Image (cartoon, grey):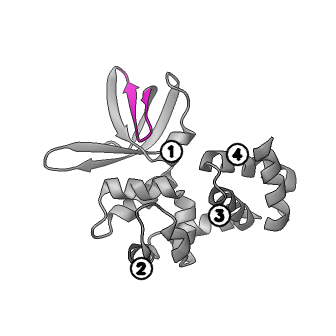
C-alpha cells in the first residue's frame, strides 16, 4: 500500500500529476485544490497518497496534506460515493471548509459544490458529521483559529483561489495576532489579494 510519494514533479495537469520516484513515474489523481498548491514542474514534490485497488486497476489519489486525505477517505466511505466523485467534492471545497460546513450543517455551502444538490448535501452531513469532527475543530484550536478559518472561507466564497486565499490569511495572521474579528480581517485580506 502506497501512503506517500516524494519525488520530482515531471507532469502537472489540472486533475493529475506524474511523480518520478527514483526512475519510476507514478500517475496520481489530485483535486484542483491540491493542484493549485503544487510547485512548478521539475521541482521536488511530496503528496499523501490513498491507494485504491479495483479488480482491473490500482489507482493513486494524492493530497497536499493529511486533512485532505482524511476528508477523501470519509467521503469514499459513504454509500454511492466513489473516489472520482469524492475528488470532485474536494475540488469544490477545501477539506477544512468541508468539515466546518458539515459540523455547522451548512446545506447552502455544500450545495455550492458542483454536482452536489440538496439531497446529497443532507446525506453528506448525516454520514460525515462524526467522521469529520476532528478536522472541523482543528481551526478552533489556535487563538483566533476560527476567525482565520472563516476569513479563508469568505475569500474562497468571493471567488479567490483557495491557495491565494490561504496566502492572504497567512499574511494577515502574522500582522493581526490572536485577538481578531472577521470584520477587521476581511478588508486587510482583500487589500493583499488586490495588490
- The answer to whether residue 27 is visible is yes
Q: Are marks 2 and 4 in contact (CB under 8 Å)?
A: no
Q: Earlier in the sequence, mark 2 or mark 3?
A: 2
Q: Looking at the image, do the residues carrying marks 2 and 3 touch, with CB atoms under 8 Å apart?
A: no
Residue 17 is left or right of residue 139, and the answer is: left
Q: Which residue is mark 2?
A: 126
Kind of element beneath mark 1: helix
Report the residue marked by disc 1: 34
Q: Position of residue 147 (x, y in %)?
A: 74, 66
> Marks 2 and 1: CB-CB under 8 Å?
no
Badge 2: few (under 14), some or many (20 or more) residues near its Cα, within 10 Å?
Answer: few
Please determine whether, in this image, residue 88 is positioned above or below residue 117: above
Whether the magenta-drawn stretch holds residue 13 is answered as yes
Q: Earlier in the sequence, mark 2 or mark 1?
A: 1
Earlier-in-chain disc, 3 versus 1: 1
Most extreme residue toward the left is 55
Q: Position of residue 114 (x, y in %)?
A: 45, 60
Residue at 75 percent across and 46 percent down: it is 193
Q: Which residues are magenta?
A: 11-22
Q: Are marks 1 and 4 in contact (CB under 8 Å)?
A: no
Nearer the observer: mark 3 or 1; the answer is 1
Can the viewer see residue 64? no
The disc at residue 167 is: 4
- 181 over 53 or under it: above or below: below
According to the picture, the residue beneath numbered tag 3 turns out to be 139
> From mark 2 to mark 3, how far is it between C-alphas?
21 Å
Q: Is residue 78 magenta?
A: no
- Relative horizontal placement of residue 174, taking residue 82 as reference (left or right): right
Amino acid at each position: 500500500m502506497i501512503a506517500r510519494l516524494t519525488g520530482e514533479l515531471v507532469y502537472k495537469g489540472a486533475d493529475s500529476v506524474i511523480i518520478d520516484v527514483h526512475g519510476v513515474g507514478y500517475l496520481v489523481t489530485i483535486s484542483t485544490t491540491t493542484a493549485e498548491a503544487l510547485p512548478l514542474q521539475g521541482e521536488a514534490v511530496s503528496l499523501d497518497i490513498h491507494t485504491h485497488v479495483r479488480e482491473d486497476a490500482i489507482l493513486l489519489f494524492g493530497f497536499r496534506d493529511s486533512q485532505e486525505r482524511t476528508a477523501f477517505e470519509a467521503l469514499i466511505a459513504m454509500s454511492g460515493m466513489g473516489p472520482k466523485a469524492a475528488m470532485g467534492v474536494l475540488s469544490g471545497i477545501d477539506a477544512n471548509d468541508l468539515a466546518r460546513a458539515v459540523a455547522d450543517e451548512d446545506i447552502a455551502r455544500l450545495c455550492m459544490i458542483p454536482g452536489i444538490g440538496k439531497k446529497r448535501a443532507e446525506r453528506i452531513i448525516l454520514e460525515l458529521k462524526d467522521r469529520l469532527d476532528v478536522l472541523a475543530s482543528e481551526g478552533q484550536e489556535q487563538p483566533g483559529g476560527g476567525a482565520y478559518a472563516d476569513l479563508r472561507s469568505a475569500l474562497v466564497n468571493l471567488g479567490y483561489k483557495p491557495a491565494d486565499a490561504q496566502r492572504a490569511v497567512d499574511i494577515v495572521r502574522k500582522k493581526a495576532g490572536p485577538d481578531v474579528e472577521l470584520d477587521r480581517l476581511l478588508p486587510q485580506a482583500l487589500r493583499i489579494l488586490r495588490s
